[in-house]
Amino acid sequence: MQVRADRVSLEGHHGTLLPPTSLTVGEGDLAIVHGEPGVGVTAFGLALAGRLKPSTGTVTVDGSDAGLPALVAVVDAPEVSEPDDALPLRVVVGEELALAHRPAGKEDVARWLTEHDAAPYAGTRFENLAPALRTRLLTELAAARKGVRVLVLDTPDRHTSDVGSWAGLAREQAGRGLAVVVLTATTPASALPFTPARIGSAEQPEPQHCLPELPQPTEELPVSPGNVTDGVSE
């Protein structure tokens, strides 16, 4: 599976939201996209997910634009998919499990929190969660949605300056075979773990491939009849 954004741009009522931007990611790939703080990076993420129709350019998966919203989950997008800060974590998890069409009763939520080492924070207001925990839980919930094969993490760097807290998580998800795009805005490009793609650019660096390489089969050497003793010593 390959998702390709080809010179995608978006125009708003008051000007350009997103200048023409291209990106290609496939299964097991991690791409970091860097842009200026503002609506542009989120607009690109929503276009990748098929939730905003580009003014110009196209977004396709394996050459077609069908089914994008079901394949792509946008994680924690400001004013779009970010949870209400005032809600306790258990309510947020319940809502996300229901969205994923998974059991979402009290016991189901408690079990999920325990499995993800977050049970002590069940009653904590979402805004008071540590940034690394917030991003990890929202990412795991999005990845659990049926049919999702692409994760777009929207500016996790707006919550923390600790790049490693979200970069390791993104690599882990890509290592499971998902295509992962991380949108960044407040972290300097020089502090990112590898060269990012840029908002407003059509020529982009290759994403980082995170799937472990399968071992290559070894060639069996031909056996010479003269070398076979069948275990009999002379």
Image (cartoon, rainbow, N blue to C red):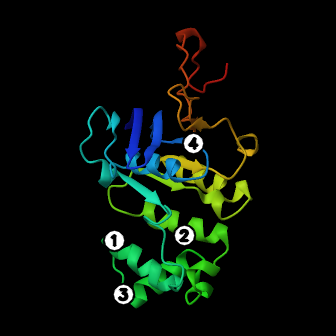
Q: Tell whether label 4 touches label 3 (CB within 8 Å).
A: no
Q: Secondary structure at mark 4?
A: strand
Q: Secondary structure at mark 3?
A: loop
Residue on which the image places disc 3: 105
Residue at (66% x, 54% y) in the render: 168
Residue type, label 1: Leu
Residue on which the image places disc 4: 33
Residue type, label 4: Val
Residue on which the image places disc 1: 99
Residue type, label 3: Gly
Q: Secondary structure at mark 1?
A: helix
Sequence-earlier tag: 3 or 2: 3
Residue on which the image places disc 2: 137
Percent coordinates x, y for residue 36 in the rendering: 61, 46
Crowdedness of circle 2 by 10 Å Cα count: few (<14), some, many (20+)? some
Q: Measure how far apart labels 1 and 2 are at the Cα level.
A: 15 Å
